Image (tube, helix red, strand yellow):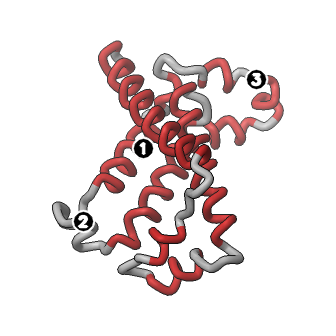
């Protein structure tokens, strides 16, 4: 991997990490945050998203949403567990995209919107194991637990 390749992955990882971390933290600090309105406005897979907006399920969805964004950001910024967190983050972005309407997610998009771009960027980070580009992944994968459970090292990167 060239120095430019590492630097490019590092910059993508840090900028996306900050974006996700900031989104998660601002939701966490907002006592009025709820994904209920977003879920209730679903245009596709209406039944599924309305189910997620039910009063018994919504607190779990809010928890997973807020902490998923926050921890994804932390993972990307530190460069630890990027392979797994980036894949899960890409899944989260697709789950954000689906209720918007697949053909026209917003007034200025035809199929592809920012959620799809974020998902693609996260998959690039996962594929290239970007935690090793000026991140703590090399140190993290050297911990003794990974010599005992080598498949865990493969999962986390």
Q: Does 99 sit left or right of 69 as displayed?
A: left
Q: Secondary structure at mark 1?
A: helix
In the picture, the quarter occupied by the N terminus is top left
Q: CA distance from mark 2 to mark 1?
A: 21 Å
Q: Residue 153 at x, y = what percent?
A: 68, 35
* Residue at 76% from the left image edge and 31% from the top image edge: 146
Label 1 environment density (alpha carbons within 10 Å; few <14, some 14–19, many ≥20): many
Q: Identify the disc placed on residue 122.
A: 1
Q: CA distance from mark 3 to mark 1?
A: 25 Å
Eye-nearest disc, 3 or 1: 1
Q: Earlier in the sequence, mark 2 or mark 3?
A: 2
Cβ atoms at labels 3 and 1 below 8 Å apart: no
63 relative to 111, above or below: above
Nearer-the-camera pick, 141 or 35:
35
Q: Find disc 2 in the rendering and name its residue.
A: 106
* Residue at 58% from the left image edge and 42% from the top image edge: 70
Q: Identify the disc placed on residue 133.
A: none
Q: Secondary structure at mark 3?
A: loop
Q: Find disc 3 in the rendering and name its residue.
A: 143
Q: CA distance from mark 2 to mark 3?
A: 45 Å
């Amino acid at each position: 991997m060239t120095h430019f390749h590492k630097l490019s992955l590092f910059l993508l990882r840090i900028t996306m990490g900050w974006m996700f971390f900031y989104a998660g933290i601002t939701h966490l600090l907002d006592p009025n945050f709820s994904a209920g309105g977003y879920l209730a406005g679903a245009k596709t897979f209406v039944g599924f998203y309305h189910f997620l907006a039910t009063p018994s399920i919504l607190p779990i969805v809010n928890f997973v949403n807020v902490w998923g964004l926050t921890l994804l950001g932390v993972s990307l910024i530190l460069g630890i567990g990027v392979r797994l967190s980036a894949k899960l983050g890409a899944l989260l972005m697709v789950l954000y995209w689906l209720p918007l309407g697949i053909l026209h997610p917003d007034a200025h998009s035809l199929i592809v919107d920012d959620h799809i771009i974020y998902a693609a960027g996260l998959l690039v980070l996962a594929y290239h194991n970007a935690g090793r580009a000026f991140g703590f992944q090399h140190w993290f994968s050297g911990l003794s637990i990974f010599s005992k459970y080598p498949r865990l090292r493969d999962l986390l990167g």
